[in-house]
Amino acid sequence: MPKAPSNTVKVQVRVSKEDADLLQARSVAVGIPLTEYAGTLLTRAFYQREAEAGEEVLIPLVRRAVRAECNRFLDRIMEMMVRNYMEAGTARRLIEAAMVFPAPQSKAFIKELESINWDAAYDDLREDIRGIGDWRALIPPEGEGEQDGHGR
């Protein structure tokens, strides 16, 4: 029997008979002693588990960072949509007013009309979104809807 390297320590473990037979067959197939083969498997499994433990620490942090960035992105989109609604509503009302009032009008009159129409667009917006409520309520809370620990 070959001598074990000097930097190794013998560790005894218990496995099922089926696993022992499988380990023995595989070690013979690879051409190395069972103790060396099993030791290599155990060492690889240990370091793999350590790497996964690091991922387990990082995954929630990454998930929170992505969620925060998505929330900022959604906020910006909502702000742009509201701004677009307000601008379009005001422009539509000003075009309608231009067809009713004789031209030319003073700049002060046009600015006052713009302010009135902006306020009217805001009132319409409040009425239109009344049924939506808090749009953030449509986003599931963190952890909800996740089947496994990876958000899938």
Image: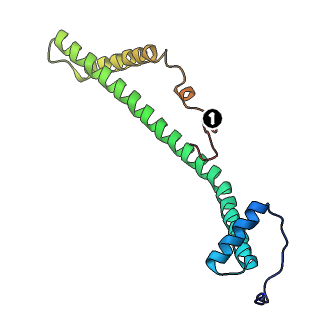
Residue sitting at x 84%, y 79% = 10
Horizontally, is 33 left or right of 72 in the view? Answer: right
Left or right? Give the position of 94 relative to 136. left
Residue wearing tag 1? 144
Frontmost residue, 123 versus 29:
29
Image quadrant where residue 32 sits: bottom right
Residue 64 picture location, percent across and down? 61, 46
Q: Quadrant of the C terminus?
A: top right
Determine whether 3 is above or below 91 in the image. below
- Identity of the residue drawn at 62% across and 52% down: 59
Q: Which quarter of the picture shows residue 79?
A: top left
Residue count near mark 1 (Cα–Cα under 10 Å), binned few <14, some 14–19, many ≥20: few
Q: Is residue 150 above or below residue 102?
A: below
Query: Residue 99: where, in percent of width, then height?
Result: 17, 12
**Residue 48 in view, yes or no:** yes
In what quadrant of the picture does the N terminus appear?
Answer: bottom right
Where is residue 4? Give x, y as percent: 78, 87
Q: 42 or 84: nearer the eye?
A: 42
Kind of residue at badge 1: Glu
